[in-house]
Image (tube, rainbow, N blue to C red):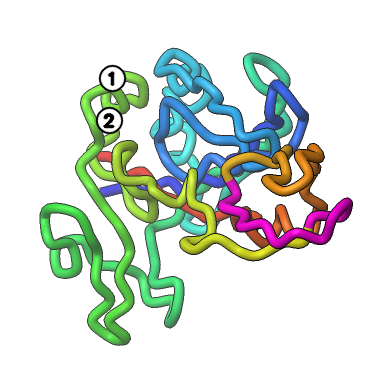
């Protein structure tokens, strides 16, 4: 099996904030403006549809980086690199470490990395794709919309009333004085921490 590592970041079409595309998703989420961004199968085909042929010409560890202006403004990095343990850096051996369903497990340190068979739409868009590692399936990427689990207290700047903030809306109304309050950056970032960019991988036969 030959592997391609992928790192991808697009600019949100609505607010220009960077949005990391950390897996083969047909919809991604901007944490800055809270909007969903459609990422259709056809765009995946245009971007990485022939990636297998490209990385076949690379030596292991070689890759390339591009700034692309098209359907999205984006930075795309890819190269010939197999998935590896993020903790001890051991390269995964698919025949030994993949459970055949949803994960790779490092036998040296027990670190788990998600893995799954390439969905039908991805196999059509990206020639030869059979396995994805380092990303969650589309319907299991709960991190995208995640906020803090419990509400936090915040004092209304007008009346000092104690408000419980759940992070769903940035512009709220004080239940005591009815003042409209825009939550400050530090509180909003605490409720919606920045998502770190991660590498993920496509395996080809």
CA distance separating discs 1 and 2: 8 Å
Q: Quadrant of residue 126?
A: top left
Q: Quadrant of residue 171?
A: top right
In this picture, residue 166 sits left or right of residue 104: right
In the rendered image of this protein, does residue 7 appear above or below residue 190? Answer: above
Q: In the image, what residue occupies the spot 46% across and 27% down?
A: 27
Which residue is the site of mark 2?
A: 128
In the picture, the quarter occupied by the C terminus is top left
Residue 156 in picture, x, y percent from top left: 80, 55
Q: Quadrant of residue 122?
A: top left
Q: Would residue 148 be counted in the magenta stretch?
A: no
In the rendered image of this protein, does residue 42 appear above or below residue 91? Answer: above
Q: Secondary structure at mark 1?
A: helix
For the residue pair 107 and 181, the one nearer the viewer reads as 181
Q: Is residue 80 visible?
A: no
Q: Is residue 71 visible?
A: yes
Residue 105 in picture, x, y percent from top left: 24, 71
- Magenta segment main secondary structure: loop
Q: Which mark is residue 110?
A: none
Dot 2 crowding, Cα within 10 Å, few <14, some 14–19, many 20+: many
For the residue pair 41 and 93, the one nearer the viewer reads as 41
In this picture, residue 100 sits left or right of residue 119: left
Which residue is the site of mark 1?
A: 124
In this picture, residue 152 sits left or right of residue 126: right
Residue 115 in picture, x, y percent from top left: 27, 53
In the rendered image of this protein, does residue 77 appear above or below residue 193? Answer: above
Q: Which residues are magenta?
A: 156-167
- In the picture as drawn, the residue positioned furthest to the bottom comes out as 108
Query: Disc 1 or disc 2, which is closer to the eye?
Result: 1
Q: Would residue 162 be counted in the magenta stretch?
A: yes
């Amino acid at each position: 099996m030959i592997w391609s590592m992928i790192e991808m970041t697009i600019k949100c079409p609505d607010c220009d904030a960077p949005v990391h595309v950390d897996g083969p998703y047909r919809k991604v989420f901007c944490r800055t403006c809270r909007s969903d961004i459609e990422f259709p199968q056809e765009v995946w085909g245009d971007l990485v549809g022939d990636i297998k042929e490209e990385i076949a010409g690379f030596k292991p560890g070689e890759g390339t980086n591009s700034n692309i202006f098209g359907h999205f403004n984006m930075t795309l990095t890819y190269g010939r690199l197999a998935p590896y343990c993020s903790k001890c850096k051991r390269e995964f051996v698919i025949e030994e470490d993949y459970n055949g369903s949803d994960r790779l497990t490092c036998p040296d340190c027990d670190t788990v990395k998600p893995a799954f068979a390439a969905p039908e739409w991805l196999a059509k868009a990206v020639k030869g794709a059979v396995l994805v590692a380092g990303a969650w399936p589309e319907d299991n990427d709960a991190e995208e919309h995640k906020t803090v689990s419990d509400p936090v207290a915040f004092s209304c700047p007008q009346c000092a009333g104690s408000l419980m903030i759940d992070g769903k809306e940035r512009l709220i109304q004080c239940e005591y004085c009815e003042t409209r309050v825009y939550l400050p950056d530090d509180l909003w970032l605490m409720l919606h921490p920045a998502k770190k960019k991660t590498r993920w991988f496509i395996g080809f036969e």
